[in-house]
Image (tube, rainbow, N blue to C red):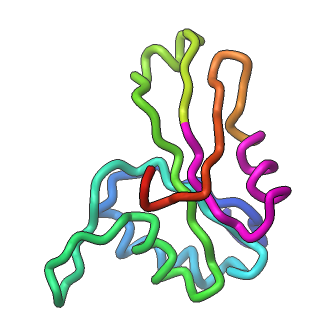
């Protein structure tokens, strides 16, 4: 399902990532594919026990050239589903303003406004 994908959207409980990511990694080209995580929370480094952003955990497993942004906002799923006006921020740095803007446009809708920043860690 992910073969030759250019965009991966991660929306699942973070505890499933360790088993799933190697399978995905085997089927995508990390130089042509970007990711966006909608996963809430933090991961923890197994050795240092320090917190690690989920987007960084995804990047580490997916390979050196894979970039993963995050989509975050104070939205309630029910409000989004009912098309109430909501807003969110896409934090990404995919190497060019045009790539960042194209990714923002994937999510931006009339009732779901998305702005873009480059500070993934700050989102």
Looking at this rendering, what residue extends furthest in the right direction?
A: 98
Residue 35 inside the magenta-drawn segment? no
Q: Residue at 78% of width from left, 75% of height from top?
A: 32
Q: Is residue 33 left or right of residue 79?
A: right
Q: Residue at 67% of width from left, 63% of height from top?
A: 1
Q: Position of residue 55 (x, y in %)?
A: 45, 65
Q: Is residue 91 left or right of residue 110?
A: left
Q: Position of residue 107 (x, y in %)?
A: 68, 37
Number of numbered discs overlaid on the protein picture: 0
- In this view, the residue in front, 116 or 79, is 116
The stretch in magenta equals 89-105
Q: Residue at 47% of width from left, 14% of height from top?
A: 79
Q: Residue at 51% of width from left, 76% of height from top?
A: 59
Residue 48 falls in image quadrant: bottom left
Q: Position of residue 117 (x, y in %)?
A: 61, 49
- In this view, the residue in front, 25 or 1, is 25
Residue 6, compared with residue 76, is above or below; it is below
Residue 99 inside the magenta-drawn segment? yes
Residue 121 falls in image quadrant: bottom left
Looking at this rendering, what residue extends furthest in the left direction?
A: 49
Q: Is residue 76 left or right of residue 4?
A: left
- In this view, the residue in front, 2 or 97, is 97
Residue 15 falls in image quadrant: bottom left
Q: Position of residue 122 (x, y in %)?
A: 43, 55
Residue 96, compared with residue 41, is above or below; it is below
């Amino acid at each position: 399902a992910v073969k030759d994908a250019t965009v991966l959207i991660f929306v699942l409980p973070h505890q499933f990532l360790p088993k799933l990511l190697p399978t995905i990694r085997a089927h995508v080209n990390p130089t042509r594919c970007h990711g966006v995580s909608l996963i809430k929370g933090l991961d923890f480094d197994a050795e240092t026990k320090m917190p690690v952003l989920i987007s960084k955990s995804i990047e580490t497993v997916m390979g050196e050239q894979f970039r993963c942004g995050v989509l975050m906002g104070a939205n309630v799923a029910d409000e989004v589903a009912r098309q109430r006006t909501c807003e969110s921020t896409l934090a990404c740095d995919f190497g060019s303003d045009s790539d960042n803007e194209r990714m923002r446009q994937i999510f931006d809708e009339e009732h779901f406004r998305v702005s873009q920043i480059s500070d993934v860690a700050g989102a």
